[in-house]
Image: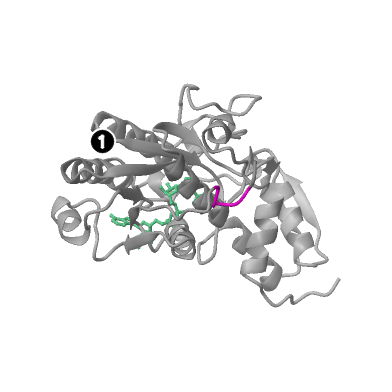
Amino acid sequence: VDTGYCGSEDVLHVKIVVAGGRGMLGTDLAAVCRAGGVEVVCRDLPELDICDPDSIAGALEPCDWLVNCAAYTAVDRAESEPDRAMAINRDGAAHLAAWCRRQGAKMLQLSTDYVFDGETEKPYMEDDVPSPLNQYGRTKLESERVVQASGVEHLTIRTQSLFGPGGKNFVEAIRAQLDQSDTPLRVVNDQVSSPTYTRHLARSILRLLEAGNRGIVHVSAGGCCSWYEFAVAIVRSAGANRDVIPVSGSEFPRPARRPRYSVLATDRFEAWTGMTMPSWEEGLRDYLLATPTENKEST
Ligand SMILES: NC(=O)c1ccc[n+]([C@@H]2O[C@H](COP(=O)([O-])OP(=O)(O)OC[C@H]3O[C@@H](n4cnc5c(N)ncnc54)[C@H](OP(=O)(O)O)[C@@H]3O)[C@@H](O)[C@H]2O)c1
C-alpha cells in the first residue's frame, strides 16, 4: 500500500476532459495529470456551460473520461437559490451524462458527504442511506441519481472538506484571519469530517481510473477532526501565537445546516486501489509547502 499515484511504471493511457477545470479540484487534477503524462483538457465557464447542451456539444471534445468538477458549491447561498443550484448540479450532470453516452465516453461525477445527515457515530459506507440536511446536499444527491439513471458507464466519488491551491477554502480563511486581526479565533467544534487536500484526491482519482471499478466510492483524507481541531493545526503550522476557542455550531447560525459527523469510510477505495489516502495532517503539511505565505506573527 502506498500513497502516491503511480502504482505501475506505466503512464495511464487515457484522455481526460475536465468540466469545471478551473475550479479548485479541477485545477489540481489537471496539474496531476500533466505531471503524470496523462492527456488532459480543461473546460469551464464561460466557454462551457453545463446547463446548456449546445454549449456542451461545442466546448467538449472526444475523450475516454469526462470528469465533472463543475458545480454550484456555495452551500449557504444554495438555500436561497435552490433552483439555480439544482439546474447546475443535477441538470448539468444529466446533460453531461447524455453527452458521454452519445460519445461513448465514461463519466466521473464528484459528490459530497453532505448527502448524509451526520446523525451517526461511525464512518459512512457507500451503501448507507443518504438524507441530506441542506439544499446543496440534495442537489448533489440528485446529481448522483441522474448520472446513474442515464446508463452511462460511470464512477461517482463522494469526498469532503476540500482545500487546494487557488480555492476559497478553510485553510485560507484561517490564514486570512491571522493576517487581519489579533483577536482569538472562535471555531466550531461539533462538526467532524476529514479535510482533504485536492492534490491527494487528484492522485486518487487517477488511481481509480487505472483500477477500472464502477459505481460509488468514498475518497477522503485519513483520520478526522473538528473544524476547531483543524484550525488549531493550521495556526500551529503557521507558527502563530494565537488562541483558538472551541464553540458550538449553534453560536454561528448559517443558512444551511451541516452534518455533525460526516466522516466517510474509505475501505472500498482501499480495496479497489491498494492505496490509502494520506491523513488530513499530511494533506495540510503538503498544502502549506505548496502555498507558502509570509508569516506575519512571530512565536
Ligand atoms: N469544495 C468542497 O469542500 C467539496 C466537498 C465535497 C465535494 N465537492 C465537490 O467536488 C467538485 C469540485 O469542487 P470544487 O471545490 O473544486 O468546486 P469549485 O472550486 O467551486 O469549482 C467549480 C467550478 O465549476 C464552475 N461552474 C459553475 N457553474 C458552471 C456551469 N454552469 N458550467 C460550467 N462550469 C461551471 C465554477 O465556475 P465559477 O467559479 O465561475 O462559478 C468553478 O470553476 C464539485 O462537484 C463539488 O460539489 C467539493
Residue at the spot of label 1? 152
For the residue marked with disc 1, what is the amino acid?
Val
Q: Is residue 111 left or right of 147 when viewed as pictured?
A: right
Q: Is residue 117 left or right of 146 when viewed as pictured?
A: right
* Residue 131 image position (x, y, % from top left): 46, 26
Q: Nearer the viewer, residue 23 or 86?
A: 23
Give the vertical position of 71 relative to 117 (above or below): below
Q: Is residue 119 visible?
A: yes
Q: Is residue 187 visible?
A: no
Name which quarter of the figure residue 263 lies in: top right
Q: Give the quarter the ligand 1 occupies.
A: bottom left
* Residue 237 image position (x, y, % from top left): 76, 62
* Residue 99 image position (x, y, % from top left): 19, 46
For disc 1, the neighbor class at 10 Å (few under 14, some 14 to 19, many from 20) is many
Q: Which residues are magenta?
A: 3-7
What residue sits 48% from the left and 34% below the top? 217
What residue sits 38% from the left and 37% below the top? 155
* Residue 49 image position (x, y, % from top left): 24, 57
Queried whether the magenta region covers residue 6, the answer comes back as: yes
Q: Mark 1: is the Cβ under 8 angstroms from ligand 1? A: no
Name the outermost residue toward the front.
9
Name the outermost residue toward the left.
54
Element at label 1? loop
Name which quarter of the figure residue 283 lies in: bottom right
Position of the N terminus, as image quadrant, is: top right
Q: Is residue 28 left or right of 53 when viewed as pictured?
A: right
Name which quarter of the figure residue 294 lies in: bottom right
Queried whether the magenta region covers residue 260, the answer comes back as: no
Q: How many marks?
A: 1
What residue sits 74% from the left and 77% below the top? 296
Give the vertical position of 117 relative to 19 (above or below): above
